[in-house]
Image (spheres, rainbow, N blue to C red):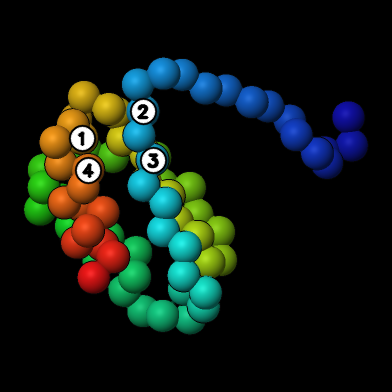
Amino acid sequence: MDGEGVIGIAGTDGFIEIKIHKFGMNQRVGVGEKALRIVRKNNVPIEQIPMSIDRMSIIFRKENLVGKEKQIASDIAK
């Protein structure tokens, strides 16, 4: 294998992802910090935070987020 392309795919049920996409996000200070502060304020543990230049996803176990997802997404969007 030459190290290029897809090297693995995994998945499981029971997770929810909140995606944040903002052009130029990598040039703005505090975007990720704000999102993580909001999640912490709602006392929700995070499973993973995949990121790229203009995108950030926060992945949660579904049972930890139920009933809080709309409020968290709304607060992050402000």
Q: Mark 2 near mark 4, Cβ–Cβ under 8 Å? A: no
- Using the image as rendered, state which of residue 73 and residue 36 is in the foreground: 73
Q: Mark 2 near mark 1, Cβ–Cβ under 8 Å? A: no
Percent of width and height locating residue 15:
36, 28
- Using the image as rendered, state which of residue 47 and residue 18 is in the foreground: 18
Disc on res. 74 = none
Give the Cα distance between marks 3 and 1.
10 Å
Give the Cα distance between marks 2 and 1.
9 Å
Give the Cα distance between marks 4 and 1.
6 Å
Percent of width and height locating residue 64:
19, 30
Q: Is residue 47 visible?
A: no
Q: Amino acid at mark 4?
A: Glu
Q: Neighbour class for label 2 at 10 Å: few (<14), some, many (≥20)?
A: some
Apparent side of residue 62 relative to residue 51 in the rendered image (left or right):
left
Q: Mark 2 near mark 3, Cβ–Cβ under 8 Å? A: yes
Q: Residue furthest right?
A: 2
Q: Amino acid at mark 2?
A: Phe
Q: Which residue is mark 1?
A: 65
State the residue at coordinates (22%, 43%).
Answer: 69
Q: Earlier in the sequence, mark 3 or mark 4?
A: 3
Q: Which residue is mark 2?
A: 15
Q: Is residue 56 visible?
A: yes
Q: Earlier in the sequence, mark 2 or mark 1?
A: 2
Q: Quadrant of residue 52 in the image? A: bottom right
Give the Cα distance between marks 2 and 3.
7 Å
Q: Mark 4 near mark 1, Cβ–Cβ under 8 Å? A: yes
Disc on res. 69 = 4
- Using the image as rendered, state which of residue 39 and residue 67 is in the foreground: 67
Give the Cα distance between marks 2 and 4.
12 Å
Q: Neighbour class for label 4 at 10 Å: few (<14), some, many (≥20)?
A: some
State the residue at coordinates (46%, 70%).
Answer: 22
